[in-house]
Image (tube, rainbow, N blue to C red):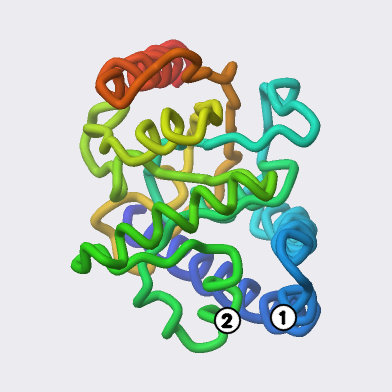
Amino acid sequence: MKWLKNLLARLYAAYALILFICTMLIMLLPMWLVSLLPSPRNIRYFMALGRGWMHVYMPLIFCPVRRKGMEHFKSKEPYIIVCNHNSMMDIPTTAYAIPAGNKSLGKKEMEKTPIFGIMYKVGTVLVDRTSPESRKRSIQEMKEVLQEGVHMLLYPEGTRNKTDEPLKFFYDGAFTLSIETGKPILPAVIFNTRRILPPGKIFYALPHAIDIHFLPPVYPDGLTLADTESLKERVFKTMWEHIEQHR
């Protein structure tokens, strides 16, 4: 029966990809038009359209998103949302779940992707990780995003977690940003996206419900850059324990 499961998984992957492309083409024009608005209205309307898109797309591919902890979002307060990263399905999940305008940090080379790159660069602070100048500029851009009242979504693991551990090592960026701006960290934990796109398999996907839990915010009040490591460890421990308790 393994061959049948592989066949169905590849047929499902084709269905999900074709549906993504078709719906993306429908959304491209309105999302491009709102991107021309002045900041921060452009990203707020852009992400509102993106949420609407994902609220249609995710059920159609039989991957409903279930949210917990929405009460932790306070009106008009921007957060640095830090999220675990298990698969590419984390991106549509966060687009679905985060209830307001937000930008993420992403690879600059992705803006060259045909059609999708147009949307990608609107909702993303672009960075060339091989360039110190680009990394420095991206930090300033993230600060400007937060100053405009827009959330920043960061994956502190840097890359997808393909290990058996709940989390990989966290980088300092999100926590330094929190201390320098005074903006709180809002931890978020996603479950089951690795079941949809298992690591190591090519063009293979299986439908599954997704859970995303938003945890209480962590405020950097009174902290200095010397406390970056302790802030990082506090958030890491909180997310690790939550994953262990709920997976």
Q: Nearer the viewer, residue 223 or 20?
A: 223
Residue 167, image x and y in percent? 30, 30
Residue 4 visible in rendering = no
Amino acid type at circle 1 is Trp
On the rendered image, what quadrant is the C terminus found in? top left
Q: Nearer the viewer, residue 236 or 55?
A: 236
Q: Eyeballing the image, is 231 above or below 22?
A: above
Evaluate if marks 2 and 1 touch, with contact meaning CB atoms under 8 Å apart.
Answer: yes
Q: Is mark 2 on a helix, strand or loop?
A: helix
Q: Which mark is residue 79?
A: none
Q: Mark 2 points at which residue?
A: 118
Residue 131 visible in rendering = yes
Sequence-first tag of 2 and 1? 1
Q: Eyeballing the image, is 120 above or below 156?
A: below
Which of the 4 quarters of the picture holds residue 56?
bottom right
Is residue 90 rendered to the left or right of residue 226? right
Q: Mark 1 points at which residue?
A: 32
In the current view of this chain or complex, which residue is farthest to the bottom?
114
Q: Eyeballing the image, is 118 above or below 154?
A: below
Q: Residue at image x 48%, y 62%?
A: 125
Binning the other alpha carbons within 10 Å of mark 2 as few (below 14), some (14 to 19) or many (20 upward) gives some
Q: Which of 207 and 133 is in front in this view?
A: 133
Residue 105, image x and y in percent? 44, 56
Amino acid type at circle 2 is Ile
Q: Is mark 1 on a helix, strand or loop?
A: helix
Alpha carbons under labels 2 and 1: distance apart: 8 Å
Residue 41, image x and y in percent? 78, 61
Q: Residue at image x 28%, y 42%?
A: 161
Q: Which of 43 and 14 is in front in this view?
A: 43
Residue 70, image x and y in percent? 72, 27
